[in-house]
Amino acid sequence: RRPAILVTGGAGYIGSHTCKLLSAAGYLPVVFDNLSRGNERSVAWGPLVVGNIRDRTVLQQAIRTYQPKAIIHFAALAYVGESVHEPAEYYSTNVSGTIAVLDAARASSIENIIFSSSCATYGVPETLPIRETSAQNPISPYGRTKLMGEQIIRDYASAYGMKYAILRYFNACGADPEGELGEWHTPETHLIPRVLMAASGMIDEIEIFGADYDTSDGTCVRDYIHVIDLARAHLRALMHLEAGGESLSVNLGTGHGVSIKEILQAVTRMTSKSVPAVFRPRRPGDPAELYADPAGAREHLGFMPELSDIDTIVRTAAPFFGLETAASTIPMPTAKRSRSTAP
Ligand code: UDP
């Protein structure tokens, strides 16, 4: 029997890509998702339990049924702007929800937890690149909920004998190279999908929020990491904990910053479409420049991004917007379980 892994938020963007790799690596991903933001069609590699993570009865029942060996906890609300206007929703889902998941793990003696954190926990960085030891001073309710989640997990781990991998994502993007999964947010606010929507004519133009930043070309710089690379890192974190590795908190980024203008140029280069763009004022809460020091994930998990160059990101995401790109073969990374961790 394949070892089951409970994946909260497994119908979402990063969760669904991770389920696909979990399945390829010999696990049974059991998705627990209320489908408020996730998509039922993205659940294809194991059972789906529809429920809210704050509903402790349903959560416990799912755990009793499937007996998961670990929990990967993706389920959360994740729009910075929305969190400013709806903080109650964010604290409830992201903080109370995380406590409910941890309590369920504790009640069932599930020791290994992988938690989706964010570079938003760092706020405006004092120095670049951002290291795991950099100060965490989030500037949005969203960032604060993720920092609180981290703190709660650490306290549970030290008191109740659990182990964790806290993964701080930088800018997730791209799509399954095999075309089975994509980025489907409603509404779509993220830069790369919106640039592709502008290139394909689905929207009239892309708004660029701020051209007067203190960066090389005046636009914001971010560390874009391919969703399949994020998924690969979750597998590595799982195997690390299963093999007896220590709890850890690591950044998941590439270490390279890319500007908004560079994204537009890459889309034009890859799709041969022009991208109509207009400049708008800065978006509140956007730091000028964010990029990770990726050394921690390399050192502790042996993780290095493989698909996170901008051309590959654009090439995998473009088909979902009806755009053709220069032909190429994109290797699907293998995610085999190592012999030592096989049951
Ligand atoms: N951005 C933009 N236009 C858009 C969406 C995003 O100029 O339509 C900018 C945004 O201000 C930020 C960067 O693109 O500087 C990445 O934003 P996104 O929302 O994709 O991710 P975030 O960094 O907020 O997690």
Image (cartoon, grey):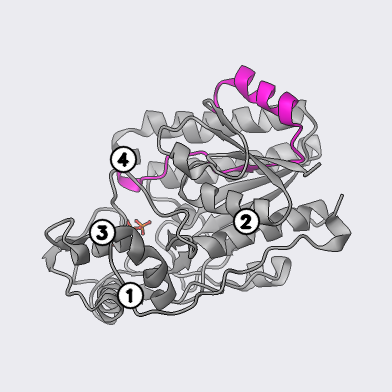
Three-letter code, disc 4: Glu
N-term-proximal mark, 4 vs 2: 2
Foreground mark, 4 or 2?
2
Residue at image coords 13%, 68%? 276
- Is label 3 in a helix, a strand or a loop? helix
N-term-proximal mark, 3 vs 4: 4
Q: Residues within 10 Å of mark 3 (few under 14, many from 20)?
A: some
Foreground mark, 3 or 1?
1
Foreground mark, 2 or 3?
2
The numbered disc on residue 30 is none
Q: Which residues are magenta?
A: 53-82
From the viewer's perspective, is 156 left or right of 256?
Answer: right
Q: Is residue 80 magenta?
A: yes
Three-letter code, disc 1: Thr
C-alpha gap between disc 3 and disc 1: 17 Å
Three-letter code, disc 3: Arg
Instruction: Evaluate whether residue 209 shows in this view.
Output: no
Q: Is mark 3 within 8 Å of ligand 1?
A: yes
| Location of mark 3 (residue) | 194
Residue 220 point in image, percent of width and height = 29, 69
| Location of mark 2 (residue) | 21
Figure check: 108 above or below 229: above
Figure check: 228 above or below 20: below
| Location of mark 4 (residue) | 82
C-alpha gap between disc 2 and disc 3: 26 Å
C-alpha gap between disc 3 and disc 4: 18 Å
Residue 99 point in image, percent of width and height = 61, 31
Is there CB contact under 8 Å for labels 3 and 4?
no
| Location of mark 1 (residue) | 325
